[in-house]
Amino acid sequence: MARRDDLGLRAALADRLLPVLVAAMSFLAALALAGTLASASLAASWRVQAGATLTIQVPQPDDPDVSGKLTRLAAVQAMLARTPGVINPTVMSEADENTLLAPWLGENVAQLGLRMPGVISASWAGPGAPDALGATLGVVSPGTLVDAGAVWAARVAALTGSLQDCAAAVLVIVALVAAAVVGVAARAGLAQRRDTITIVHGLGAQDGDIANRFASRATLLVAAGAIAGTLLALPVLAWLAALATPFSGAAGGLFNLPPPLWFALPMLPLAAAGIGWVTAQLTVRGWLRSLA
């Protein structure tokens, strides 16, 4: 049996505009929530990768080193092979250097008559940052530069941190707008049914009973809109996950979304319903107090 609607709330709080607005806001909230979780996950992965990368530049690589027994490049490579924490030091070939510099210096750097430094790439697995590595290599090959990925890791952390802050701000704004929309809808319903509610209230109906009726209707509409908006966001999230595959290394698609996101998405309709209930209660109770 359908629940009685003595106050005419089905007409006062229509089931069209409010759910549509809430669905749109839930869609945005789902994207913001996914952005927050994804940026945190990618940031952790990128910080580890960037922080472990070493790039060593050896000027005049074919000149003799300090001992005169090896070239500067060979001496640095040998020193890296003996240094604890340095993994897989690899000399970049001339072809790779040409490919790397082609966008700025052309296809064949040798034609420019420039003496290019030797470049060695390696990974760092030692404790802490490799701050002393440059001084160590400078003993056998003065002027050798060590570029650790710590700087880039810090920049990645700052960037992803700002992205998370922006996403959190979007969630807060969406929640505030949702509360405002519910409040406006509740006030419109009160204005439409003012005479009926005034009579019922004057006959002794409790503020809580009237507020509960409004809050129940508003919560139902808000929850329906939030569920629809969250479901509409799933295909978009799957598409974004597919686009992020080259950066995350995980397979894209709907079923490969991060587990925390699957846990958080069902919370959106619950949170929206809670906002609807609280806002409707406060709005109706405040309006009823004004009648006294």
Image (spheres, grey):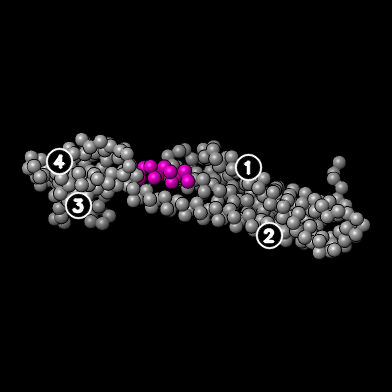
Element on which disc 4 rests = helix
Of the numbered discs 4 and 3, the one sitting upstream in the chain is 4
Q: Tell me how far mark 4 sits from mark 3, CA to CA.
A: 27 Å
Nearest to the eye among marks 4 and 1: give it. Answer: 4
For residue 266, which numbered disc appears in the image? 1
Element on which disc 1 rests = loop
Element on which disc 3 rests = loop
For residue 108, which numbered disc appears in the image? 3
Pointer 4 local density, CA inside 10 Å: few below 14, some 14–19, many at least 20: many
Of the numbered discs 2 and 1, the one sitting upstream in the chain is 2
Amino acid type of the residue tagged 2 in the rendering: Ala
Of the numbered discs 1 and 3, the one sitting upstream in the chain is 3
117 or 214: nearer the eye? 214
* Residue beneath disc 4: 75
Amino acid type of the residue tagged 1 in the rendering: Pro
- Judge whether 94 appears above or below 191 on screen: above
* Residue beneath disc 2: 180
For the record, the magenta segment spans 40-50
Task: Identify the residue at horizontal 81%, vertical 61% (top origin).
Answer: 289
Q: Is residue 47 magenta?
A: yes
Task: Identify the residue at horizontal 38%, vertical 52% (top origin).
Answer: 155
